[in-house]
Image: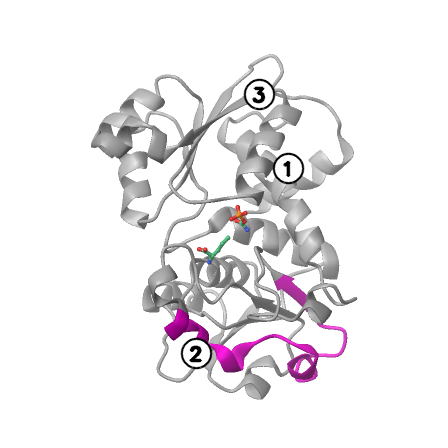
Amino acid sequence: MKKIFDITDSLKKSKKKPLERLSPILALLFEKSSTRTRISFESAMLQLGGHSIYIDSKTSQLSRGESLADTSRVLSSYVNIIAARMYRHSDIEELAKYSSVPVVNALTDLEHPCQALSDVYTIKEEFGRVKGLRIAFVGDIAANTANSLMITAAKMGAEVSLVGPRGYAANFEYLLQASKFETIETTDDMQDGLKGCDVVYTDTFISMGQEAEADKRRKLFSKYQLNEEVMKFARKGAKVMHCLPAHRGEEITSDLLDGKGSIVWQQAANKMLVEKAIILYLLNAAR
Ligand code: CP
Ligand code: NVA
């Protein structure tokens, strides 16, 4: 992680195209929608001097039954990196198993690791450190973003407070892993959960693939909206984060998203920078 962040820092100062000579190709194989991740990866590759090819899984032979293993074997003979956004986490593991090139997780039902890296990088940029901070994740504490954030933040020395409805558990595997590095607390009480927090993070209540449960989930999480009122429970000057896309008026109010404590736009912009570092790291091309 330190290496990725160091490369990210160095990229901020450089306008060079370190991949121009190598001219590598990134395949973006996506089963789900994306604005930020797709465009930031494509732009990152272009700015580094490489190329990218977007493959909508619905128009590939995957949609006609070609196996993930065969797709991965073939794709990896054409490109230098694959970034994939899949419904099932096991599918990206299958892709990685049969690929001869690095496979980047661009989101699955369980994880969103590139997002978490750029989120924690943003926190470090904002506070000058991650160690010793307290980060709350509010709402769908079992979301892919929550799983990846708790592990990445805890590894960097931040405490994590998961705040969600009673009877709705965080993913135990991720909780267990993150707890090996730092304190991870869970509560259904917004006041308790936000107490002493430097950062308050939320995500949609209805992740991609959960559309059939939309009404049920809206009801379940309705008391866990981030707004000006609940931010009073956090530390004064606490920062607000959201991976986006936001559903204004649902998991977060517009006041908060557009307010002075919001670092969501910086967070979104940093995705491209951190993805550049991930690409350089995987291609072993960082100077
Ligand atoms: N945050 C994020 O991954 O956004 P997209 O779904 O638009 O890629
Ligand atoms: N939890 C959300 C993240 C979107 C970037 C989802 O999976 O839809």
Magenta-tinted stretch:
215-241
The answer to whether 198 is drawn above or below residue 82 in the figure is below
Q: Secondary structure at mark 3?
A: loop
Q: Earlier in the sequence, mark 1 or mark 3?
A: 1
Q: Which mark is nearer the camera, 1 or 3? A: 3
Disc 1 CB within 8 Å of nearest ligand 1 atom: no
Q: Position of residue 174 (x, y in %)?
A: 38, 63
Residues packed near mark 2 inside 10 Å, few (<14), some (14 to 19) or many (20 plus): few
Viewer-side label of 3, 2? 2
Q: Seen in the image, is 278 located left or right of residue 235?
A: left
Q: How is the image coloured?
A: one colour
Question: Which residue does the numbered mark 3 point to in the structure image?
Answer: 50
- Circles 3 and 2, Cβ within 8 Å, touching? The answer is no
Tell me the distance, in whole angstroms, between the alpha carbons under discs 2 and 1.
43 Å
- Label 2, on which residue? 219
The residue type indicated by label 2 comes to Lys
Q: Which residue is mark 1?
A: 7
Cα distance, mark 1 to mark 3? Answer: 17 Å
Q: Residue at x 32, y 28 (%)?
A: 99
> How far is disc 3 from disc 2 in space, using C-alphas?
45 Å
The numbered dot on residue 223 is none
Q: Earlier in the sequence, mark 2 or mark 1?
A: 1
Tell me the element at label 2: helix
Q: Residue at x 50, y 44 (%)?
A: 34
Task: Locate the C terminus and report the quarter of the image it occupies.
Answer: top right
Badge count: 3
Question: Residue 275: x, y in percent?
Answer: 57, 38
Q: Earlier in the sequence, mark 3 or mark 2?
A: 3
Left or right placement of residue 160 versus residue 208 in this view: right
Horizontal placement of 263 versus 251: left or right? right
Q: Amino acid at mark 3?
A: Gly
Q: Which residue, as the protein is rendered here, is positioned at the far top? A: 21
